[in-house]
Amino acid sequence: MVAWWSAVFSGFGPYLLCQYLRGTFLTLAEVILNTLAHINEGMIYSFCGQFELAKVVIEPKWAFGYLTIYLVAIADSYRSAIYQNKLHHLAVLEYKGIRRLHISPMEIQYIEKKNPIIGALYSFFLPGLGQLYNHRFGLAFYAMLW
């Protein structure tokens, strides 16, 4: 799941893993490199069948940078998710309790049962409201700003 969200938009995978600084840097890097490489313009031309214009518009050196960030974000998110799953498994084996509340400088995390339909409805009306419902304040305000 985390690798999929990183493939959708670099930085979303780390956000799901509560790695906000890494997610912010990857998101900004993708936006900047996408703009410099003119990826979206090339996609529009290629979807319209104007392949020669797509070749002319895309900047190859920035496109390779974009590809690098894109692939690194997917691989790093997958690696981080596997590592966090291993830590969770070790905690379960050692009978360590899981904290229901964690307060850090970046956010407050609660472990409680939530209704995913309500979160989806909130996000439908305004991106980020579903994250507020889930008490993921850093991700919520970041989504609202974008």
Image (tube, helix red, strand yellow):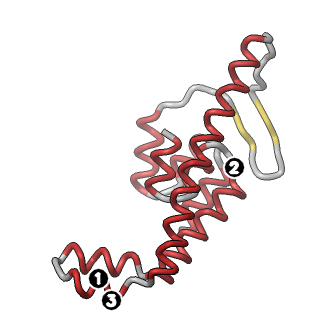
SS for callout 3: helix
Instruction: Count neighbours of disc 3 (C-alpha within 10 A) and say few if under 14, some if 14 to 19, many if 20 or more.
Output: few
Is residue 25 placed above or below 53 in the rendered structure?
above
Read off the residue under disc 1: 54
Rendering coords of residue 82 (x, y %): 62, 33
Label ID, residue 79: none
- What is the quadrant of residue 18 in the picture? top right
Pointer 2 or 1: first along the chain: 2
Front residue of 62/117: it is: 62
Instruction: Count neighbours of disc 1 (C-alpha within 10 A) and say few if under 14, some if 14 to 19, many if 20 or more.
Output: many
Does 9 sit left or right of 135 as displayed?
left
Read off the residue under disc 2: 19
SS for callout 2: loop
Front residue of 98/45: it is: 45
Is residue 108 placed above or below 99 in the rendered structure?
below
Identify which amino acid the numbered label 2 is placed on: Gln
Residues at discs 1 and 3 in contact (Cβ within 8 Å): yes
Is residue 62 placed above or below 106 in the rendered structure?
below
Give the residue drawn at x 49%, y 66%: 67
Read off the residue under disc 3: 56
Rendering coords of residue 146 (x, y %): 53, 68
**Distance between the alpha carbons at the discs numbered 1 and 3:** 5 Å
Give the residue drawn at x 50%, y 72%: 64
Give the residue drawn at x 53%, y 52%: 129
